Amino acid sequence: MPTERLMLRGFRPEDWRVLARFYSDDSVMRHMLPGRGLTPKDAEQRAKSNIHNFNESWRERGYGVWAVASRESGHLIGQCGLRFVPEAYDGKGAVELLYLLNKTHWGKGLASEAANAAVRHAFNATALPALFAVTSPQNAGSRNVLRKLGFQEQGMRVLWERDVLWHDLAKQD
């Protein structure tokens, strides 16, 4: 799916190398679990596993996480999309909007552009009634992206044994 500056596409098997570089970068991962970059081996395993799971979600659910590539260069610069989280809402499950971009692309509005496309897909191409997103309280940039999209902060909650700032967006909003 093209946006003004991005190409949102399915992940390819060879994308794991670039994705693993993002996952091993302390700056990129400082607001993600575990709060720092993964070891190269763990980053490789996570990248390969995520690519499989992201693509499987598209096949099974009609939504998932896209590879985010620059339309100009074609290079992979991150990930963005929708993921079902069974642990959300005290085990009832819900769909999360997530995004992660390489630090060289921060501050350019690209996360907002990709996330907006994911929200539009959620509410126009699927029957999803609502989304949630989580951020670390210190991640002002991500909180700003969610605010621009209309998400409402719901306060602190624990997810995956971590304190996170919870945000909700209903389709009617």
Image: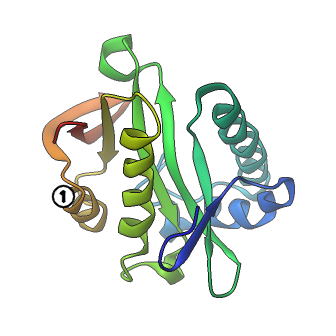
> The N terminus appears in which quarter of the rendering?
bottom right
- In the image, 75 versus 137, the foreground residue is 75
Residue appearing at x 30%, y 51% in the figure: 136
Left or right of residue 3, residue 148 in this image: left
Spot occupied by residue 96 in the image (x, y as percentages of width and height): 41, 37
Left or right of residue 17, residue 148 in this image: left
**For residue 136, above or below residue 5:** above
Residue appearing at x 60%, y 53% in the figure: 66
Left or right of residue 171, residue 78 in this image: right
**For residue 163, above or below residue 7:** above
Residue appearing at x 56%, y 68% in the figure: 2
Spot occupied by residue 60 in the image (x, y as percentages of width and height): 66, 25
Spot occupied by residue 46 in the image (x, y as percentages of width and height): 70, 45
Q: Secondary structure at mark 1?
A: helix
Residue at mark 1 = 147
Residue appearing at x 18%, y 58% in the figure: 147
**For residue 102, above or below residue 34:** below
Spot occupied by residue 91 in the image (x, y as percentages of width and height): 38, 12
Left or right of residue 145, residue 28 in this image: right
* Image colouring: rainbow
For the residue marked with disc 1, what is the amino acid? Arg
